[in-house]
Image (cartoon, rainbow, N blue to C red):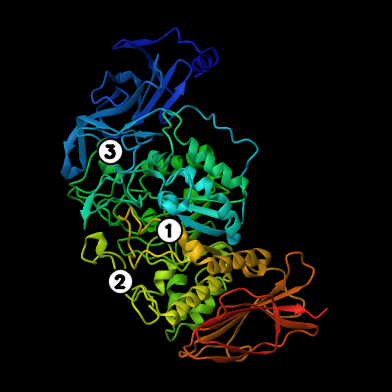
């Protein structure tokens, strides 16, 4: 190691070296996985538990055949790790892959093939699909490029470090966010395009952006044509490489400096007070099932990286053909290394884990009480300030909302919040108490003693399912354009079309739909916990009833920004609520106790201080009480919800002397008005929500 340090300092080839196929080589840096540029050469480190031999394969850029193959000398192997420094390489002139030899026995999960080119599992940049929707030439294999060292200038920017409960998360698809002509950006469908829209995000007021998968993925895995439209794997939930950003999301080629545009996006968001959360997919890979490709993990250690049945087939808890063996020590290490890399190299603020229940399954697929991977991520020092958000279910039927192993560290997409409040707001019986619990922080699911105050991420809609506009425009999914005879996607959506399925010119139905949307946004942004909604919900984005547009790289999925101008009142309404939420910490979590004696939260109905709800209750009132953000005075906020299909008279709680109720929001009105005083009795319109504050008379 001392001699290698001297190499780095002096930029010289060491005196003691070997020669192989015309190159000077020597044993490498065994703790540095992947390919790393060093003075005078490149270090290559890779490991395989079952391999008997390994070769480094070098290609000229875009050429099919290698120009040199360098077998790792047996003496360069320590344990199961192959490491070699190759001198005289210019990282701009080559791409690389590996060939790994070993036993081929599929029934035992062994798929070694010394003729197959394999992508480095730790590749920082991947060649092959830098042009979106362009299928590589036949016979092409994934290869890696070496990324130049950490030379990105972060300047004085730093993460905002926003508390979890204060997050207002805006979920977006990098391509779909600006691909439509109506976006009026110069770099449509790219990281740079998102940068151009940051002023819009600032105006809206969100403080966190959640990017749907940006790891290198294969949108061409299953291209199809349906009714004349080309369908791709648009969403990106089929990772090819966990360490490499998707090169087709950049506005220009980034040879050997991959990630620069993404880093610029992250830096700019930080400078504007917004955090960045990555939607990460560690539950499966794009290699698929028994009939799938072999381009990386299968070829290195198939029986380690994947969960296999006793006869060597793939468990499919992901619904995508294979399941990553997350709690095997090797896979644990890779996932931990990967997250550390994104945090240190890209300054990412958090991760949302797709189908995260898989991360808690044992190697045989059984759920674990204390999954070592989840525990190690919870206590990892480098991830100490990072948000960890679980989608607490998987495609194998493991549903863990409220029970995800957390160590006071993990948050969850609160699927029960979505389901309970969707049902309550459309008028289902028996949901009043559930609605109260969800709005007040789901303490029945997340005991603060065990889960802290950051467990719940509340949402009505996300990428998976109806948009908010479609939620109140369709009773049924309409996924015919996907080509599966409308059999894909969720059937039970707890939606309501307000009287007509789909598009309508009926002004009364359109008025009702927008009121229902205002109801949902008001409830969401007045609920304790993190709030999340997908891009476009704030201006009535539609997917035309498609609740599973994973393959729709077209107007079905792309945001139509013309809708912003058409629905500017909705945008202004959401913007107001976001800023109101930011101004009143009481809505986001418990504050100091109110001196007037009111409890932190209290339950009400048509009459104040309601102790319980009947099964037929459709009217709830929630009063929050505490101190204001400066701890100077009591703050009292009241959320009144009439989910009934008739008008209701609601008696408000009596305020302390010297205070009066002021109406802040009434969703029965299309626009926000100036706060106005109201008496202690409200006359609420059918299916409407009111937000009130107790304010001093002086």
Q: Nearer the viewer, residue 132 or 366?
A: 132
Asked whether residue 340 appears in the rendered view, the answer is no
Asked if 477 appears above or below 123 in the picture, the reply is below
Observer-side mark, 1 or 3, equals: 1
Q: Are marks 2 and 3 in contact (CB under 8 Å)?
A: no
Residue most toward the right?
Answer: 698
Q: Residue at x 30, y 65 (%)?
A: 489
| Residue matched to label 3 | 301
Q: Within 10 Å of the Cα at label 3, are there few (<14), some (14-19), or many (20+) other Cα atoms?
A: many
Asked whether residue 276 appears in the rendered view, the answer is yes
- Quadrant of the snapshot with the C terminus: bottom right
Left or right: where does residue 447 sit relative to residue 131? right
Q: Within 10 Å of the Cα at label 2, are there few (<14), some (14-19), or many (20+) other Cα atoms?
A: few
| Residue matched to label 2 | 491
Q: Nearer the viewer, residue 395 or 58?
A: 58
Residue 552: x and y, percent?
31, 56
Asked if 55 appears above or below 550 in the picture, the reply is above
Asked if 303 appears above or below 51 in the picture, the reply is below
Of callouts 2 and 1, the N-terminal one: 2
Kindly identify which numbered label has been placed on residue 560: 1
Label 3 sits on a secondary structure element that is helix
Q: Nearer the viewer, residue 31 or 492?
A: 492
Q: What whole-number distance in Å separates the C-alpha atoms at marks 2 and 3?
A: 38 Å
Q: What whole-number distance in Å separates the C-alpha atoms at marks 2 and 1?
A: 26 Å
Residue 575: x and y, percent?
59, 64
Of callouts 2 and 3, the N-terminal one: 3
Of callouts 1 and 3, the N-terminal one: 3
Observer-side mark, 2 or 1, equals: 1
Left or right: where does residue 127 sit relative to residue 521? left
């Amino acid at each position: 190691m001392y001699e290698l340090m001297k190499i780095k300092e002096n930029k010289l080839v060491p005196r003691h070296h070997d020669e192989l196929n015309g190159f000077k080589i020597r044993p490498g840096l065994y703790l540095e996985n992947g390919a790393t540029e060093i003075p005078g050469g490149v270090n290559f480190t890779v490991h395989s538990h079952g391999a008997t031999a390994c070769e480094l394969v070098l290609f000229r850029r875009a050429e099919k055949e290698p120009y040199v193959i360098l077998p790792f000398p047996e003496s360069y192997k320590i344990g199961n790790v192959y490491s070699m420094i190759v001198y005289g390489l210019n990282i701009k002139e080559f791409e690389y892959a590996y060939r790994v030899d070993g036993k081929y026995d599929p029934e035992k999960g062994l798929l070694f093939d010394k003729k197959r080119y394999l992508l480095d599992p730790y590749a920082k940049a991947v060649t092959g699909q830098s042009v979106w929707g362009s299928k590589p030439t036949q016979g092409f294999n994934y290869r890696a490029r070496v990324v130049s060292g950490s030379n990105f200038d972060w300047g004085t920017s730093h993460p905002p470090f926003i508390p979890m409960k204060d997050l207002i998360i805006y979920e977006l698809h990098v391509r779909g966010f600006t691909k439509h002509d109506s976006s009026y950006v110069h770099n449509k469908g790219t990281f740079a395009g998102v940068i151009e829209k940051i002023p819009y995000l600032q105006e809206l007021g969100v403080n966190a952006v959640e990017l749907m998968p940006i790891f290198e993925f294969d949108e061409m895995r299953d291209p199809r044509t349906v009714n004349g439209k080309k369908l791709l794997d648009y969403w990106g939930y089929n990772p090819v490489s966990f360490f490499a950003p998707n090169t087709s999301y950049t506005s220009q080629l980034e040879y050997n400096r991959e990630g620069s545009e993404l880093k610029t996006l992250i830096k700019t968001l930080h400078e504007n007070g917004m955090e960045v959360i990555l939607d990460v997919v560690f539950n499966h890979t794009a290699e698929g099932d028994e009939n799938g490709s072999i381009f990386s993990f299968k070829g290195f250690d198939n029986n380690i990286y994947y969960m296999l049945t006793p006869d060597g087939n793939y468990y499919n808890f992901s619904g995508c053909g294979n399941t990553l063996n997350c709690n095997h020590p090797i896979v644990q290490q890779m996932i931990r290394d990967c997250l550390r890399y994104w945090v240190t190299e890209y300054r990412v603020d958090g991760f949302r884990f797709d189908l995260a229940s898989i991360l808690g399954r044992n190697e045989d697929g059984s759920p674990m009480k204390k999954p070592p991977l989840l525990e190690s991520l919870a206590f990892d020092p480098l991830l100490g300030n990072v948000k960890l958000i679980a989608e607490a279910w998987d495609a194998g039927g493991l549903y863990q909302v409220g029970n995800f192993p957390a160590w006071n560290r993990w948050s969850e997409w609160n699927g029960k919040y979505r389901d309970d409040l969707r049902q309550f707001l459309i008028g289902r019986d028996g949901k009043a108490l559930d609605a109260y619990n969800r709005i007040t922080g789901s303490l029945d699911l997340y005991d603060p003693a065990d889960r802290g105050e950051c467990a719940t991420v509340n949402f009505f809609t996300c990428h998976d399912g109806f948009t908010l506009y479609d939620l109140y425009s369709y009773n049924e999914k309409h996924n015919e354009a996907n080509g599966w005879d409308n059999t894909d996607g969720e059937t039970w959506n707890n939606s309501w079309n307000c009287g007509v399925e789909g598009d309508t010119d009926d002004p009364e139905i359109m008025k009702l739909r927008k009121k229902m949307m205002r109801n949902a946004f008001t409830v969401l942004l007045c609920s304790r916990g993190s709030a999340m909604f997908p891009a476009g919900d704030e201006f009535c984005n539609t997917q035309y009833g498609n609740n599973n547009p994973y393959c729709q790289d077209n107007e079905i999925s792309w945001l139509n920004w013309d809708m912003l101008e058409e629905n500017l009142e909705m945008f202004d309404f959401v913007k107001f609520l976001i800023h109101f939420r930011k101004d009143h910490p009481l809505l986001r979590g418990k504050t100091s106790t109110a001196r007037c004696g009111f409890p932190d939260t209290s339950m009400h109905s048509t009459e104040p201080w309601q102790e319980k709800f009947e099964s037929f209750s459709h009217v709830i009132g929630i009063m929050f009480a505490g101190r204001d953000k400066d701890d100077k005075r009591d703050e009292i906020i009241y959320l009144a919800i009439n989910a009934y299909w008739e008008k209701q008279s609601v008696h408000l709680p009596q305020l302390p002397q010297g205070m009066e109720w002021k109406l802040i929001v009434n969703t029965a009105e299309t626009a926000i008005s100036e706060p106005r005083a109201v008496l202690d009795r409200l006359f609420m319109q059918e299916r409407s929500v009111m937000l009130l504050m107790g304010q001093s008379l002086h």
